[in-house]
Image (cartoon, rainbow, N blue to C red):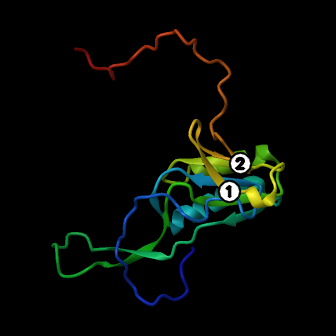
Amino acid sequence: MLMPKKVKYRKQHRGRRTGKASGGTNLDFGDYGLQALEPCWMTANQIEAARIAMTRHIRRGGKIWIRIFPDKPYTKKPAETRMGSGKGAPEGWVAVVKPGRMLFEMSGVSEDLAREAMRLASHKLPIDVRFVVRDKAAPAEEQELEETPAAGRETQASRPVSLEPEMHEAPEPGAKREESDGGREA
């Protein structure tokens, strides 16, 4: 399990989960990546489960980089304890993840194999993620995320790709969708 070897203080404040990631948003090591789309506290167990899912799928091929580290302790009070009387005991370690943060990177395998391995890993994570591919045509200096007003958040050096299988039949533009009332009758 990932955890710091030594920390100065056993307990930390919770902090805020708002905002976007300012660093660690690009593909720095591998050709394929898994990027967070939501904020969360990712536990050491979740990171390890995702790593195991990826390594088992790619077997001996390729290399995987874990781009986050659980360096924040979280505490928990014992069950059936009254409120007050101080902060709880340290329970485990979490990595603070913000939208845009690159979680894992991979290289040395085909895109199809990397996509499937990262899809399996995404099921172990508590947030929505996207699969990102490095664009080989772009120079190394221009590998940063850029804002485009029309398409939202797109990349010049890497392109986001959905983890879901592609739909080959699109509904007609004028077609009306059937709306379900959730099984309730009016």
Q: Where is residue 142 in the image (x, y as percent from the top left)?
A: 74, 56
Which element is circle 2 on? loop
Residue at 27% in and 74% down? 78
Amino acid at circle 1: Glu
Q: Position of residue 135 (x, y in %)?
A: 78, 49
Which element is circle 1 on? loop
Work out whether residue 123 or residue 115 is closer to the camera in this orientation and state it: 115
Residue to which mark 2 is pinned? 156
Work out whether residue 110 or residue 120 is closer to the camera in this orientation and state it: 110
Relative placement, left or right, of 58 versus 91 is: right
Q: How far apart are marks 1 and 2 (CA)?
A: 7 Å
> Are the residues tagged 1 and 2 within 8 Å (C-beta)?
yes
In the displayed structure, would residue 160 be above or below residue 121? above
Quadrant location, the N terminus: bottom right
Q: Earlier in the sequence, mark 1 or mark 2?
A: 1
Q: Position of residue 107 (x, y in %)?
A: 79, 58
Residue at 57% in and 71% down? 69
Quadrant location, the C terminus: top left
Residue at 26% in and 79% down? 87
Residue to which mark 1 is pinned? 144
Work out whether residue 164 or residue 16 is closer to the camera in this orientation and state it: 16
Q: Which of the 4 image quarters holds residue 161?
A: top right
Relative placement, left or right, of 23 versus 98 is: right
